[in-house]
Amino acid sequence: MRSIQFREALREAMNEEMRRDERVFLMGEEVAQYNGAYKVSQGMLDEFGPKRIIDTPIAELGFTGIGVGAAMNGLRPIIEFMTFNFSLVAIDQVINTAAKILSMSGGQYGSPIVFRGPTGNAGQLAAQHSQNFENWYANCPGLKVVVPSNPYDAKGLLKSSIRDNDPVIFMESEVMYGEKGEVPEGEYLIPIGVADLKRQGTDVTLVSFGKIIKACYEAAAELEKEGISAEIIDLRTVRPIDYAAVVASVKKTNRLVIVEEAWPLSSIATDISYHVQRHAFDYLDAPIIRVNSMDVPVAYAPTLLEATLPNAKRTIEAVKSVLYRK
């Protein structure tokens, strides 16, 4: 199987869906002439032309509204945010129109649209460019929220998102665009709302999603040296959440650590903790531990980033705590 970059997997997904369905188009800042801020849309203008690969002004509210209107009228837009930090300018269109129009119109209008772009910390980008909004958008009925962690999942999930009849928030990571992974040559789809068991284990369940799942892989490798077997579940989507997969794993390992880059209050980790104690309380041999970013604005200094973001070290400490080995 070939190995391609995360950005190439996204591009292949969009290319294949645009060739398949002429209603699909891409719109956003620098997506056309510049080939994308992160080169995700490289070469797409040459193939599909300026009517389907559309550069916009720096006006997220405006072009998001155009995309939502286009979706309501039968097209299938892909709206790229240069970063989801900038989506806050357009959040009224996403939450109050795209997510609600199907319900408010009694099923007369839908909004089959994908909002995609990078989320979270990407190095020294400071407080206004390093935030996680997965849990914000996941709070809203009517939206689906997808957060892939590797090229294979990214391609299959993006294709499913473009074909979905509901609005989908598709969150990537700037630091993952150049990372490579195995992706099949042929077409495939990954269903939205199905978690993936990435690593079998017996002593503790680690649940995560997006780029921060790497902390789980690193932690599991180190813990294995000490005879601790960690199971890893990649949620892949955080609305809907595959609660059944998490509960089934906890019933086997009896311990749970959730690793998430977002702040702790009202996080995805908080919601999973509730569901596990509700449906697997008698199987827990220790309290659930969340490993989130510290409850402070994201700093610029590398030393402060290291101190506030989730990492393998904090994950290992959490695992040893639920195993009462701390």
Image (tube, rainbow, N blue to C red):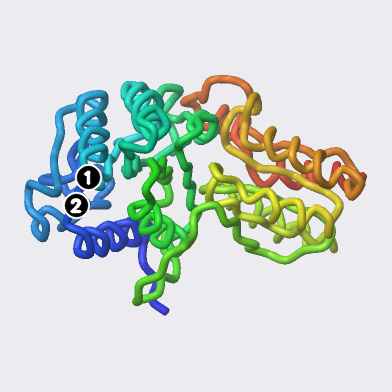
**Where does label 1 land, which residue?**
74
Is residue 132 among the parts visible in the rendering? no
Q: CA distance from mark 1 to mark 2?
A: 8 Å
The residue located at (35%, 61%) in the rendering is: 9
Q: Quadrant of the C terminus?
A: top right
* Mark 1 or mark 2, whichever is nearer to me: 1
**Among the 4 quarters of the image, the one containing residue 8:** bottom left
Percent position of residue 19, x then y: 19, 64
Name the image quarter holding residue 151.
Answer: bottom left
Please tell me whether mark 2 sits on a helix, a strand or a loop.
Answer: loop
Q: Position of residue 168 (x, y in %)?
A: 40, 43
Q: Say what amino acid the circle numbered 1 marks.
A: Gly
Number of marks in the image? Answer: 2
Vertical placement of residue 197 versus 205, above or below = below
From the image, tell me which residue sits under label 2: 23
**Residue 119 showing in the rendered view:** yes
> Residue at position x 36%, y 61% from top?
5
Q: Is residue 273 above or below residue 316?
A: above
What residue is rendered at 49% in x and 54% in y? 192
* Amino acid at dot 2: Arg
* Quadrant of the frame with the N terminus: bottom left
Towards the viewer: 72 or 224: 72
How packed mark 2 is, by other alpha carbons closer than 10 Å (few <14, some 14-19, many 20 or more), is some
Q: Residue furthest bottom?
A: 1
**Mark 1 or mark 2: which comes first in sequence?**
2
Residue 230 locus on image (x, y percent): 76, 58
Drawn side of residue 257 relative to residue 235, left or right = right
At numbered mark 1, what does the secondary structure look like: helix, strand or loop? loop
Label annotation for residue 132: none
